[in-house]
């Protein structure tokens, strides 16, 4: 016996119920879709933040190395090198310090700070997520 045949004494309600379940998967997909989209948008936002962090980290390393090699103008050279790369996001700030002075063997510290905003839409009564995070990357080299 399949679901479409009615046996003697059986109610036709069983046949009707099976026919009404044809759109069930579409309804379930429609209910789950907003959560999947929200998850996908969150992954994309995290990927953007990670990319920006890696970019400023690499720029800080390159700048610190350039500054360490040219000891007498370490901070100027480091800042110029970082800005000439053209890879740090707009709005980043670069700071350079030489706590031990411009003496061979002393550290040169480069710090790049960037404010990153995450924006995710709100739905089903959940408020939108709009947060700003500060990404900070530092690099240190010894002056040569």
Image (tube, helix red, strand yellow):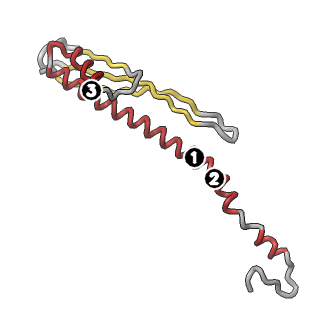
Alpha carbon distance from label 2 to label 1: 9 Å
First in residue order: circle 1 vs circle 3 = 1
Question: With 115 as the anchor, is 130 left or right in this view?
Answer: right
- Image height check: is 67 above or below 20? above
Give me the residue at 82% from left, 83% from top. Answer: 6
First in residue order: circle 2 vs circle 1 = 2
For label 1, the residue is 37
The answer to which of 29 and 113 lies nearer the viewer is: 29
Q: Label 3 neighbourhood size at 10 Å, few (<14), some (14-19), many (20+)?
A: many
For label 3, the residue is 139
- Image height check: is 22 above or below 48? below
- Image height check: is 133 above or below 43? above
Q: SS for tag 3?
A: strand
Q: Residue 19: give its label.
A: none
First in residue order: circle 2 vs circle 3 = 2
Task: Specify the quadrant of the image occupied by residue 64.
Answer: top left
């Amino acid at each position: 016996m399949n679901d479409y045949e009615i046996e003697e004494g059986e109610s036709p309600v069983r046949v009707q119920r099976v026919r009404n379940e044809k759109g069930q998967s579409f309804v379930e997909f429609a209910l789950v879709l907003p959560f999947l989209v929200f998850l996908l948008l969150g992954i994309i936002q995290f990927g953007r933040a990670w990319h920006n962090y890696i970019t400023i980290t690499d720029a800080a390393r390159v700048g610190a190395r350039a500054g360490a090699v040219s000891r007498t103008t370490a901070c100027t050279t480091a800042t110029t090198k970082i800005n000439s790369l053209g890879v740090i996001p707009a709005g980043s700030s670069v700071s350079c310090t030489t706590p031990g002075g411009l003496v061979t063997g002393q550290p040169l510290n480069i710090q790049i700070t960037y404010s990153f905003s995450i924006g995710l839409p709100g739905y089903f009564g959940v408020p939108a997520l709009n947060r700003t995070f500060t990404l900070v990357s530092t690099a240190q080299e010894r002056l040569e």
